[in-house]
Image: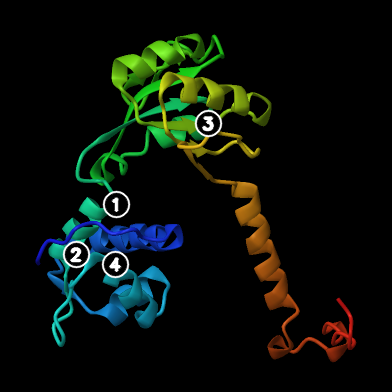
Amino acid sequence: MPESRPRNIPEATVARLAVYLRVLAGLADDGRSHVSSGELATAAGVNPAGLRKDLSHLGPCGVRGVGYSVAGLRDRLTETLGGARSRPCVLVGAGRLGSALADYSGFPSRGFEFVALLDTDPATVGSAVGGLTVRPVAELETVVAETRASIGVITTPAEVAQSVCDRLVTAGVRSILNFAPVALAVPAGVDVRKVDLSVELQVLAFLDQQRDTSPELGVPDVVRPLPARAGAR
């Protein structure tokens, strides 16, 4: 597979490329050597045309009539997404969610390594999670300097998330994954990705409700939304 220089890729496309990489990793584990665009698109939950458009950002990838090399495309995606080298991550908030993330074995294979866990709870500090000893959050700046962490993960309560974010940024961290249910303010040059589990569950609740009230399921017409009146906003 020929090499190509990285190009500017839209953020939404990057998110889908990460999904393709996950699917390819599973196919590789199953011993697959090639995959068609249709099969890869179905597994990733997108349409084939959209998948081909996404992969066009990488340059030539597949062979007509053969499909994509699983190993080759996986390597190309890994390089494009920055997973070719391990990226040290520091996690602040070693509660249940933080501990579950730190103990997950799937991150190293994707190029992410938790190098430090920090917390304020005296009962948690000093405990072992995922092969690491939880350190006091007072040592945050020292930990970032020691480990050269490039990614910070915040799983703290909302009321302290901004202060933790500020300290991470001051310490030199420029990429932050935020699980706290609050929007973080960061200076230019710092990237924040927010994961709000409550929002995702709310979306699922809405979709579930839509299924419950769908006419195709035999629900009486009286529950259908009334058409908007002309000029209504």
> What SS does tag 4 mark?
helix
Closer to us: mark 2 or mark 4?
4
The image shows residue 3 at horizontal and vertical percentages of 12, 61
Mark 4 is on which residue type? His
- The residue shown at (36%, 38%) is 104
Which of pointers 3 and 1 lies earlier in the amino acid sequence?
1
Left or right of 202 in this view: 118: left
The image shows residue 9 at horizontal and vertical percentages of 36, 60
Disc 4 and disc 3 in contact, CB within 8 angstroms: no
The label shown at residue 96 is: 3
Q: Residue furthest left?
A: 2
Left or right of 209 in this view: 54: left
Residue that label 2 marks: 73
Residue that label 4 marks: 57
Mark 3 is on which residue type? Arg
For disc 4, the neighbor class at 10 Å (few under 14, some 14 to 19, many from 20) is some
For disc 2, the neighbor class at 10 Å (few under 14, some 14 to 19, many from 20) is many
Mark 2 → mark 1, Cα distance in angstroms: 12 Å
Disc 1 and disc 4 in contact, CB within 8 angstroms: no
Residue 97 visible in the current orientation: yes
- The residue shown at (66%, 69%) is 207
The label shown at residue 81 is: 1
